[in-house]
Image: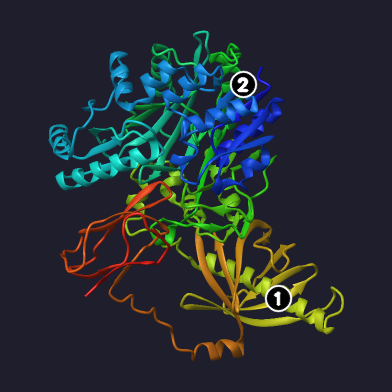
Amino acid sequence: MFKKILIANRGEIACRVIKTARRMGIATVAIYSEADRNALHVEMADEAVLVGPPPAAQSYLVIENVLAASKQTGAEAVHPGYGFLSERAAFAEALKKAGIVFIGPNVHAIEAMGDKIESKKFAAAANVSTVPGFLGVIEDDSHAKKIAAEIGYPVMIKASAGGGGKGMRIAANESEVAEGFARAKSEAKSSFGDDRVFIEKFIVNPRHIEIQVLGDKHGNVIHLNERECSIQRRNQKVIEEAPSPLLDDATREKMGSQAVALAKAVGYDSAGTVEFVAGQDRSFYFLEMNTRLQVEHPVTELITGIDLVEQMIRVAAGEKLAIKQSDVKRNGWAVESRIYAEDPYRGFLPSIGRLKTYRAPKESMGNGVTVRVDTGVKEGGEISLFYDPMIAKLVTHASSRAKAIEAMGDALDAFAIEGVEHNIPFLAALMQHPRWREGKLSTGFIAEEYPQGFQGALLSEEAARKLAAVASAMEFILDQRKQKISGRLIGRDFQTDKHRVVRVGGQEIALEVMRQGYAVAVRFAGKPPKQVHVLQSHWLPGEPVWRGTFDGEEIAVHVKPVPNGFELSHAGIRDKFYSYTEREAALARLMPKQTAAASGKSVRCPMPGLVLSVAVKAGQEIKGGETLAVVEAMKMENVLRAERDGKIKEVKVKPGDSVAVDAVILEFE
């Protein structure tokens, strides 16, 4: 077994590999860019080596630098994680020539299956069901339009190399093919150093289901059942689960057998994933093979009890698989939520900045529920514009899908992040969505259910009253604290009743708040019989999460103080709850409503990033919908379009400029 390995990656996956290596008694070496000097994976590793400037193309993607770090530290093997160099045959070959073991598949398997065009040819030769498409390299946009017309719309334009939703576009017509082709090639070039793309038929209302395979260097290959990854946004997976609510045992066995046969055909000898697009009728087609560890591997680990990173290391060291296909079981259900630094209320635009607060729910195993948090950040750390915006992966496991979803909802509510915008409210709302709970999924789920974007979960009357009670209980604790400081309150037996009015949105909720032993009691006005609701919590002012019980039911609510109240987040709801005395409420009703200021005639950048191109110039007449500029943020290219017809007065930026959120891109006359 290896004594020391280097992890050629960053963030949560680097930390994940370090955890298993440490348990196996293997020393670890981290690499880092100048932007990651104080990152968590650097802190966790036994050694760390600087490999270059912040841009990945100048650090994490430079094979020579990673190779030098391996030699310098005496690492016997390298684990690539996912992304970056994980599917680069040239990297595996360079390590082999240097006498360093690549903890991943052999070069032939990477070349055969890591290239999405070649993998489809292998799959077709192995009699695996494949999606109709053009398996050659697309030369230019004219060629792309011709091929798309022959296949039939809609089509998917995809990068041949890489994955993770980068270099992928769906096109429903000829004009979308031209722009999608340009964007896919550009993203593929910047993310993977390979701008080849291909086109295939896009299956309408599809589901994304993948099979985890595991092989060794002795010809043994098994599968570890399936994962469903149908909840996606812009081809980027958001929520994954295992097993799939769609499959029956017969389909599961058929998919697993095809995945194993394909892996054996190329001599696959590590952890890998065979991805399928499935119809609602359980028909399925080979999509691609990822010759690496997947982001969503934890859900497979939780239902099988198999540590995939450990198996990869053991296989790379030459050991035979100690697991047979008959040993692989399905135990319960696991759900994973990807927590990103992005603003779901503004079209999921990336967010960067310092994590002023980062309090993840405690990892635990008990009462039939497992909570797991894989992260590469820490409180005080920084989310950079140079890398993927993932903050953490939150995973829950329970005996059934319904219980795993409930556990996920509770864990999301207990997660506190401040300093950057994040998608937790959106994820929490998804956990409550009836269609998600029923398992009626497709890759179009988010676009179909949120056609106008995410505006937050609906604040029902029941939720409003419950959160108003929490706000009043916290305000009550704050008031008593002030009275203690002034000497007006002595001991816990002090009793008082308070008539309060909580304002949220356009409604007012009248209630009474009182101390009841160590708990706080709330009684709502105007709703006979006047039931007393009891709230118990150890919350102290300043804590970002209120954890406690409401009439014996456990709940967690994210808390952010605002003048005269709190901004509360719970189950996808985020709203401001203002707590007033009856006199204050009467005065508040007289205050004029504030209106948002006009945006003027400027176009502002909706996210921080790097200007890749500017498509217009001063004096130019433009039509609504025309491309104005392309801004890259966190490895994704974002097209800024004109909302209306007009004439450009002045362009404020040029390609290569770094821009902050709300920076002026251009002005109209």
Q: Amino acid at mark 2?
A: Glu
Q: Left or right: where does residue 633 sit relative to residue 76?
A: left
Give residue 666's quadrant in the image. Answer: bottom left
Residue 476's disc number: 1
Q: Position of residue 247 (x, y in %)?
A: 41, 29
Give residue 282's quadrant in the image. Answer: top left
Q: Identify which residue is drawn at 65% across, 20% down.
A: 2
Describe the element under mark 2 as helix, strand or loop: loop
Q: Position of residue 561 (x, y in %)?
A: 61, 71
Q: Left or right: where does residue 426 sit relative to residue 500?
A: left
Q: Position of residue 39 (x, y in %)?
A: 61, 46
User: Which mark is first along the chain, 2 or 1?
Assistant: 2
Q: Is residue 267 above or below residue 414?
A: above
Nearest the eye: 172 or 9: 9
Closer to the observer: label 1 or label 2? 2
Quarter of the figure with the C terminus: bottom left
Q: Position of residue 58 (x, y in %)?
A: 46, 40
Residue 76's disc number: 2
